Structure formats: structure tokens, C-alpha cells
Amino acid sequence: MSHLAQAIRELGDSGPLRRMPRANLERIATVLVLGWAVGFMLWQGAGFTITLTTIFAIWAILAVSLNLVVGFTGLLSVGHIGFFGIGAYTMAILASDASYDRLRTESIPTPDWPFFAALPVCIAIAGLVALGVGVVFNRFRDDIFVLVSFGFAIIAFSFFLNLRELTRGAFGIHEIPRPAFGSWVLDGEIEFLIFALICLALVVLICWLIVTSSFGRVLTAIREDEEAIAVFGYRVTHFKLAVWVLSAMMAGLAGALLASWTSFIDPNSFILLESMLLIAIVILGGLATIWGSLLGAMAFVLLEEGMRFLPFLPPEFVGQARQVVLGVLLVLLMLFRPQGLVGRYKL
Amino acid sequence: MSVWSGRLDLSQFAERPRDLLALVLALAVAGYIAWAISQSPQQALQFTFNGLSVGAIYALLAIGFTLVYSTVWFFDLYYGAAAAIGAYGIFYLRSGEALGGLYQVNDPAVNVVFALVTAGVAWWAIREFYGRRLRERFGPGSALGVETLIAGGLGAYMGVVLAWPNDLNVLFAPAIGLAAAVLFTWMLRRTVARLVPRPTQSGVPVAAAIIGAALGVVCGVALAHAGGSRLYLSWVVSCLLAGMVGLAFYRGLYVQIIRRTNSRLIMLVASLGVLLALTALTIIVFESAPRPLPDVFGSTPWQVGGATIKGFNVFAIGVSIAAFIGLLLLLKKTAFGKSVRAIGDDEEVARVVGINTTLVIAIVFFIGAVFAALAGVLNGHDTAIQPRMGLIMLLKGWIASVVGGIGNLYGAIVGGFALGLIEQFGIWNLAGEWKDVVSFVVLILFLSFWPNGLLPRR
């Protein structure tokens, strides 16, 4: 008994996982996740692969943008899903062309904008809300920041559910159109996937530019020691606010993509638990690394979709089983590798 | 100060604009409440009753939360899962009775897991409390055997209780009977020893044992025939289980993480993982739809001054106040409480002066989880239960303890009732769905203007 405990203790203290250089683990993780993805695609065929990759693109935008805040700046935000939802609902309200008279349910205004007219508005509204929220949240730190970001997620969800004149509450919004260039509508799954991947590439590029610039280095310094960098004359609050707003705008973009892709949204996609899963992805992949977030998002999507094929798991429990696995992984990571798989920074 | 000296000096607010804003806000709140009362005193009374009923549950949550937080200084999100475990424990044990057994659940896997948890915690407790004595008497090998045997027996007993919850009172009758017999025997012997200065007859212990055993049997038989006691025995079992799971998480998991890091955020994320996994497991076992708990006493509303309040709610308020007083006595009057406070002040120093910090903190986690489970049970009987209630109850307890003043036990109970009242009065003109928004807005206002809460920790 005590030998076993001793072995576990050694594994955690100075064991292979804790000591393993980042580069090695990154290589192993990349090979594993990509191999898993390729195997899954070969097994399931093209149609499912396209769906899966689209889901991955949306989650990856969320994860990468959240990593800007959590990993690079050190603000553990659990409220990211709120901005995601704001983007999705803005797109839904502006672009939906559903006729509710025909459906004989509560009607909401349907301006019926085209996708590309609504997209900047989605991003801008997410950014504006983030600005307002950020001004208030800027003074909080560490675990109190976690608490208030929980609060933001719950308040946002409450608005989606209860502001029925605008969001139709639990009924959700139907018939959200796909992006269209003139008369060319991206109706096909593959066209939309390419569009989503372009968005993802843009987001990754922006994040990469941010973190490699002097701005990114200031963010890292804020994470390491806020007072020290303030002494050098940097306006810490401005930097934190800027990265918070940028990250929220990216989440808004992801939300707009989701709304347009599924063409129907309801508040259940934006519950607090989803936000906790998102933070689990970011920590799992690794803090302060863009590639890690991509890997984390990919592993997460594969995990959920892969579980659909487990023979002993009833389909209605797939989401829950995924949550159990993520929770256990989170605990194990905190135990054995607190910086996440390929992370550069420990919480 | 100048306000009280009769001369209102506004310049002090110019120096600290936040205080002015806080004053304005406080006045606005007071004005709003006065306006609400003048609108309809009857409705105001009703909202006060509702606020106190909800506040009792928040206070209970906040007390336990504060106890744990002010000892280890990190946020343990398992706390929310404990509330859900408490409520679902009742549902699990009594699902045969609620709604005619429509949603009856009895899963062997659950029984085995909780039996193992019980056995593990019992094993740990025996080793911590009696380990040395057992080793001295029997030698290390046999002591281990004895410990494992007792712990295994207790675990098996818990497994049996969980497997046949419909006969809970019968299953518990021997245990309660035995406990009563021991208690009565001990009391009799003490009484006799006090009345007769020097007991000359050696028959006294034997007689005491016989009478005690007889009384124990009576208690056991009475319990076995009292079917109504099942629900309240379920409360005990449920809270015990949640507490033991909390203890097991601390001793088995958190200790291992704390040994390697001193980061509060790592602990928070690890316990987030625990909460995620437990919430999902709850949904897998019980499905995600809300469920009712069986009827409890005091469900008929009383009319007081045109407003109604349920007897059960009054009971809940009483429980939270009693729990507060009990915890206060425990912390202020006992050696255990002293060591808890010492650990809260400085864990390193506490360890240096010879306090077994792991043991004390483990017990603190147990007590905290029991409080959360009790709050979950009371809330579940008042409304319905659902798997995600754990997270929301955790957040409410967290908010209440921030509002009251984080780390202060008096603040926790004040904050709990205050949050309940604020929430109810806040939705005066809104629909009830907005109460989560109200409580988080209150939290953010408090954190912005009174970061130390109503009653700051000294």
C-alpha cells in the first residue's frame, strides 16, 4: 500500500510527466491528436469529417481567444461563453428571416440583414459589452475575478433566456442564413467549412501577432507581476482591458459563425457549464500557447464525437461522459502537470 | 466622523469618491425599500418572509463555505457538488416513496462507490484516532487487520443501507440501538458513581449494562416500527455521505496537490474538475430533469399578517441559526476550534507547534460539506432538485460570504440573510427569473464599493 503511494508521489513530484521538456511533450501530443483525428476521419468518411472540423474551427477560435486572456494575461475568466452567446444572438436577431406569424409564436423583430452586414455588428457588440464589463472587472484579481466572471456568464445566460422580446427565450431563433457573396450563398457544408477555417486562421494570425509583439510581452509581464510592470510606467489596466476586448470580439465572431452554421440557436448552447468546459480545454491544451489551444480544441471535439461510437454508452449521456472525462483530466493535470500539456505557464 | 459632529463636510467625499458613491447607493436602496413597503406592506411582508426563507439556505451555505475558506484560503468548488449530493442522496434513498416510485433509482455501482468511500474514510479515521493504541496492543500487522476489518464492515453496512433504502429504519435500528445502549450504560454508571461515592458492589457495572442494553433494544425496536423516521434518517445518511466525500477529496486529492504547489488558482481549477465530473455523474445517474423530494412536515402555509410562510421554512431558518451557534461554540470553546483558527492564521506555524493540520483540515472539510448538504436538502424540500443546482448553490454561498465579509463567520450568516432579502426585494418589479442577475449585480457592487463586505474580518 505504502509502496504504491510512494510510487504515485514520485510520479507527481519528479516523475517523467513533470520533468518532460515542453518540446518533447508537444511533439508527442501533436502526433497523438493528429493521428487520432486522421484515424477518425478515415473511419467515418468525408461527410462527418466536415461537420467535425467545422465544430473544431468554432471551438478553436474560442479556445485561442480565451487563451489570450487566461494564458497570456493571467486572468482566469469563466465568462467567455457570454461573449460567444452575444455574438451568436446578435447574428441571429439581425440576420434571421423567420416569419413568426406563420409559426404562430411570439414574434421578435427580424431586420433580415445579410450575413456580412451583421458580422461586423456582432463583433462590435461583443467588443462593446466587453469594454463595459472590463471597466468594472479590471479591479478584480485571482479568485475574485473567477467569481465575477462566473457572474458575467450567468447574467448573460439570464438575458438570453429571459429577454423574450429580443431572443424568444427558450424557443430559440430559427432560420439564420448562411454567409453569401452576392448571389453565391455558402450553403454547402464544405464551403462553410472553408470559410470557418479562414476565420480561424485570421484569429490565430491576430493572436500570434499579439503575443509576439511588444504588446504581448507586456501582457506576459502583467501575468508574472502586475505591480512590477506598473512601476515601469505601463498602464496595466489599459493593457488588460485591450486584450479582454480583443478576445471578446473573437468570441463574438465564433458565436456569429455558430449561429449561421446551425441556423438555429437557443440559450442552452450558452450555459455556464459550457464555459467551464471551455476553460478546461484551454488549460488542458496548455496555457500561453496557441498551438496547445488548437490541440485542446481538437482533442475535445474528437472526445465528444468519438464517444458517440462507444457501444456501452447511451447516446443521451455522451455530453455528460465527455464532461466526466474532462473533469478527471483537469484534476490529473493539476496533479501532475499544472501548466497543461504543452503549456508555458503554471496558474 | 464629521457627519456625526453636526457639520456635514463634503470634502471628505471628494477625497474618496467611492465612499460618496457607496453612500448614494445605500440611500437609493433604503429609499427603494421604503417605497416598496409604502406601495404594499402586505407584499413587502411576503417578500421579507421569502427572503428570510431563501436567506436561511444561503446563510447555511455561506457559513460552511466561510469555515472551509478561512481555514485553507482557497475556493473549493466541490462544495457545490456537496449540496447536490446531499439533495440527491435524499432522492436516492426515498425515490421509492416520491411520486409513487415513478423515478425510482437504485444503481449497484453507486452503492459500491459510496460503500468504498465509507470504508476508506472509516479506515482513515480509525488509523488517525486509534491507530497508535491498536498498534501498541496488537502489533502493526494485526492492527492493520483489525482496522481493515472494522472499516470494511462499516463500508458493507453503508452499502446494504443504500441497497435497501425502503427499510432504512429497520436497517438502522441495530446501530441506533447499540449506540443508545452504550450511551445509557455510560450515563447510568456515571449517575451511580456520583450518587454513591464509592461503589461497593461490583454488580453495579453489570446492572448498568443490562439496563442500558434493555433500553437500547427498546430504542431499536421503536425505531424499527416508526416508518415516518425514514426520511429523517435519510437526511442523516445523505449529509454524512456528502461530508465523507468531501473529506475523501481533501485527504486523497487536495493534500497531494497542495504538497506540490501553493497556488490558489491551481486548487480552484482542480476542484472545478471535481465539480464538473460530479455534476455530470449526477446527471448520468439521475437524468437532468428536475425531481421532487418526498413531502416533509410543515408544508402547509401559515397566515401571518396577510402573508404566508411555510412551517418548514421557519424550521430552515432555525436550522441555519442553530448551525451557526453550534459552529461558533465549536470554534470558540474547544481545542479543535482553537487549532482550526490557528491553521487559518498560519498553517506552517500551526504545524510547527504540533497541530496535526491534515487531520484538522480534513474534519473542517467534512463539516463544510455537511453544511452544504444540509442546505441542499432544505432547499430541495422547499423547491425541486436538479443536477445543476450544485453550481448555483455554490455561487450563492460564495456571493453571500463575500457580501458578509469574506472569512468572517458572523459576516457569513448576515450576508446570507442579506442576500436572500436583497434578491427578493430586487425582483419586486421583475419576474422571478431575474434573481440570479440581481444577486450577481449585488456581488459586483459589493466588490466594487465594499470589497471587505458588511462585517470585515479582523
Image (cartoon, coloured by chain):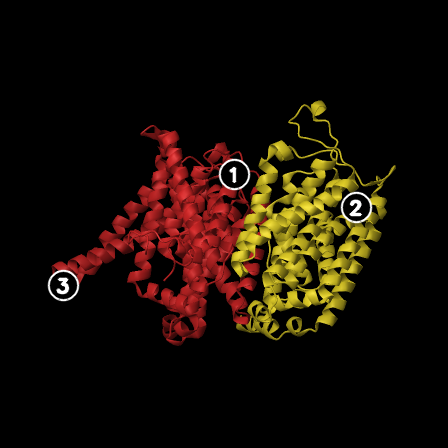
Question: What residue is rendered at 48% in x and 49% in y?
Answer: B445
Q: Mark 2 points at which residue?
A: A51
The residue lying at 28 percent from left, 45 percent from top is B218
* Residue at disc 1, secondary structure: helix
Label drawn at residue B199: 3
Can you tell which quarter of the image residue B349 is in? bottom left
Choose mark 1 or mark 3, whichever is in front. Answer: 1
Q: Which chain letter goes with mark 2?
A: A
User: Cα distance, mark 3 to mark 2?
Assistant: 86 Å
Q: How crowded is mark 1: few (under 14 residues within 10 Å), some or many (20 or more)?
A: some
Determine whether, in the image, residue B408 is placed left or right of residue A188: left
In the image, residue A129 lies at what x, y percent?
62, 47
Q: Are marks 1 and 3 in contact (CB under 8 Å)?
A: no
From the rendered image, report the letter of the chain displayed in yellow: A
Q: Where is residue B134 in the image (x, y as percent from the top left)?
A: 38, 70
Please tell me if label 2 and label 1 are on a single chain.
no
Q: What residue type is labelled 2?
A: Thr
Q: How far apart are marks 1 and 3 (CA)?
A: 69 Å
Both marks 1 and 3 on one chain: yes
The colour chain B appears in is: red
Q: What element carries label 3?
A: loop
